[in-house]
Amino acid sequence: MTTPKTILVTGGAGYVGSHCVAELLDHGHRVVVFDNLRQGHAAAVPPEAAFVRADLADETALARVFSEWRFDAVFHFAALSVVGDSMRDPHAYLHGNSVTSLNLIRAAVTAGVRKLVFSSTANLFGSPKRIPIDEDEAVDPGSPYGESKFMIERALHWADRCHGLRSACLRYFNAAGAHPNGKLGEDHSPETHLIPLVMDAATGKRPHIEIFGNDYDTRDGTCIRDYIHVCDLADAHLRVLDALEERSVRYNLGNGTGYSVREVISSVERITGRTVPVKVGPRRPGDLPVLIASSERIRRDLGWEPRFPDLDSIIAGAWAWRSAHPHGFRGLAAAAE
Ligand code: UFG
């Protein structure tokens, strides 16, 4: 039984953040969610968590939160996070994600917080030499989004060296799936992620799914990604809290298996029992042909093991959430506002 801790979760009303909040509460921790609700949903914040609706650009609001609570750790998810969008508007990512994170890091250091867990990305690896990609792979961000995450990783490196703020940089591959409790799932607006879009094409909510390029050097010509269940990501966040007693860490998080866009579409067809209309379009700027993680290091160091490694079961969970909540969080009562 771990001692209950008080954790600040920025972006805790968003997709990965809300699943981590649920995991923290399940383990008896106290949670304060800090979210501007530009992408997150008030209804994704459970009543057991305190909720502060504010923006990380607002340093006064940040200072207030750190003076009201004494945090044992910060989990930092709040960010713009769409690769293609960052190719259209690099400044929004390079400036927005870094300034808000620097504000947060400074506030945490000033308040004497010792641990920060950071939501980083596989997009750090824009030109991998080896697949699966381990933590020794050279960083060469694939987009302004990836670059913004790397800038924050570097700021955290120096916050440790200069102030003793230990950090865990968790490089997620493709977060997917939904919480088995049926209360949380993926709901972005606009939606850009493959699995929810393919499900929409299966139900007729969209006329078809467009495959972004079928001329990659892969087994069927479409891009290959490593889809990892969002609850397995959440589990990793809790495990690294203990590791941070000793030192800062960085881990790549995926299942170690890649699926092509066409294989994802086939899985959705199997799970839903429906045919998905498909059109092939041009490549999407910023996309890499293959991203597959090696998560051997976190398995070895912390005993992390994915509980939902199989794509069909990840998609079955996502489908259960989407069928029960066809409009996502819209229309659901906000528990914590
Ligand atoms: N794709 C399509 N059609 C679509 C949407 C996506 O073919 O309508 C393809 C993409 O080209 C890509 C794959 O499906 O090959 C997955 O695309 P997503 O948009 O779902 O996810 P990304 O791989 O672009 O990005 C995600 C996260 C990023 C993270 C990255 C790490 O959104 O934050 O995984 O791998 F950096």
Image (cartoon, rainbow, N blue to C red):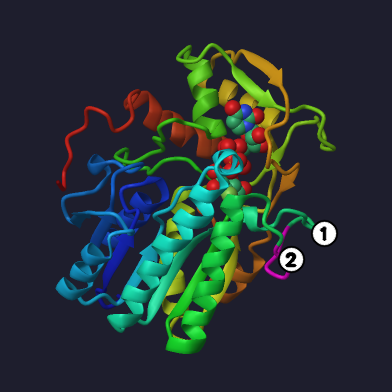
Q: Nearer the viewer, residue 276 or 146?
A: 146
Boundaries of the magenta span: 133-139
Q: Distance from label 1 to label 2 (Cα)?
A: 7 Å
Residue 183, position in %: x, y? 29, 39
Residue 123, position in %: x, y? 63, 53
> Principal SS element in the magenta part?
loop
The residue sitting at 45% across, 15% down in the picture is 205
Residue 87, by quadrant, is top right
The residue sitting at 73% across, 25% down in the picture is 282
The residue sitting at 65% across, 16% down in the picture is 278
Query: Looking at the picture, does residue 154 appear above or below residue 165?
Result: above
In the drawing, does residue 257 fall left or right of residue 249?
right
Q: Could you tell me if the residues under marks 1 and 2 are in contact, i.e. CB atoms within 8 Å? A: yes
Q: Nearer the viewer, residue 296 or 37?
A: 37
Kindly identify which numbered label has been placed on residue 129. Answer: 1
The residue beneath circle 2 is 137
The residue sitting at 62% across, 25% down in the picture is 265
Residue 18, position in %: x, y? 34, 50
In the drawing, does residue 100 fall left or right of residue 303?
left
Outermost residue to the right? 217
Residue 116, by quadrant, is bottom left
